[in-house]
Amino acid sequence: MKVENINPFIESVMETFDSMLNCRVKVGKPAVTKDDEDADDIIGVIGLTGTARGIVAIRLPIKTAVTSIGRLVGVEFKEIDSSIIDGVGEMINIIAGNAKVKFEGQKISLSLPTVVRGNMYKLNNLTGAVFLTLPFSSELGDFDLLVSFKSSDEAVGKKEEAHAGAHR
C-alpha cells in the first residue's frame, strides 16, 4: 500500500467532517491489521476498482454514529434507526468520492456503499493485503477509517508471476 494512495482518504475525511459537520478531526497513528476487529460498531464499506482495487470503510462506535449523523441531517437521534444506517452509507460514499477525485491520473470506480452493524460482521481483507487502520478523534467521538487495497500493477505482477510459475 502506497502512502500516496492513503493521503486522499485522510484529506477527504478531514474535509468532509469540517465542511459537512462543522467538526475538526485529528488523525492518530496508523496501524496495520490483518482484518477488522470484532466490535459493536456501525461500519460503512465501499469498494474500489480500476488502477487501485480494494476496500475503504469507516467504523463508527454507536455513540459517534448517532451524534455525527444527527449533526449531518440536523436531527437529534436517541438510538440507531434506518436514518443512521443510511447516513453512514452516505458518509462513506462522500469520503470515497472526494478521495477518488484526488487520485490524479488514475481511473478508479466506486461500488455502492454497504453498511453493517454489530460484532457478527467482520471485514476480511483482500488476499495478500492488510488493512491500514487510521484512528480519528473529534468532538463527536472517535472513529476509524480502514483502507485495504492493491494497485493494479501489483495485482497484474502477481498474476504474471503465478502464470509464469505454472509453465515452468
Image: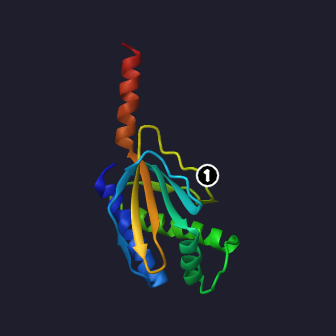
Q: Observer-nearest residue: 55 or 81?
A: 81
Going 61% across and 55% down the picture, which residue do you hit? 119
- Residue at the farthest top position: 168
Q: Is mark 1 on a helix, strand or loop?
A: loop
Say how many tags the image has.
1
Q: How crowded is mark 1: few (under 14 residues within 10 Å), some or many (20 or more)?
A: some
The residue depicted at 52 percent of the width and 45 percent of the height is 124
Q: In which quarter of the image is residue 62?
A: bottom right
Percent position of residue 77, x then y: 65, 81
Q: Is residue 38 above or below residue 90?
A: above
Q: Is residue 128 left or right of residue 124?
A: left
Q: Where is residue 67 in the image (x, y as percent from the top left)?
A: 56, 79
Q: What residue type is labelled 1?
A: Tyr
Residue 44 position, x and y percent, is: 56, 62
Identify the image quadrant of residue 68. Answer: bottom right
**Residue at the image point whose x is 36% and y is 21% from the top:** 164
Image quarter hosting the C terminus: top left
Q: Can you see residue 51?
A: no
The residue lying at 48 percent from left, 81 percent from top is: 20
143 with respect to 156 (left or right):
right
Lateral position of residue 93 relative to residue 98, left or right: right
**Mark 1 sits on what residue?**
121
Q: How was this image coloured?
A: rainbow
Q: Is residue 20 above or below residue 119?
A: below
Asked if residue 21 can be seen in this view, the reply is yes
Question: Looking at the rendering, which quadrant does residue 34 occupy?
Answer: top left
- Please identify the residue farthest to the left as the structure is shown: 3
Tell me where residue 158 appears, x and y as whole percent.
37, 32
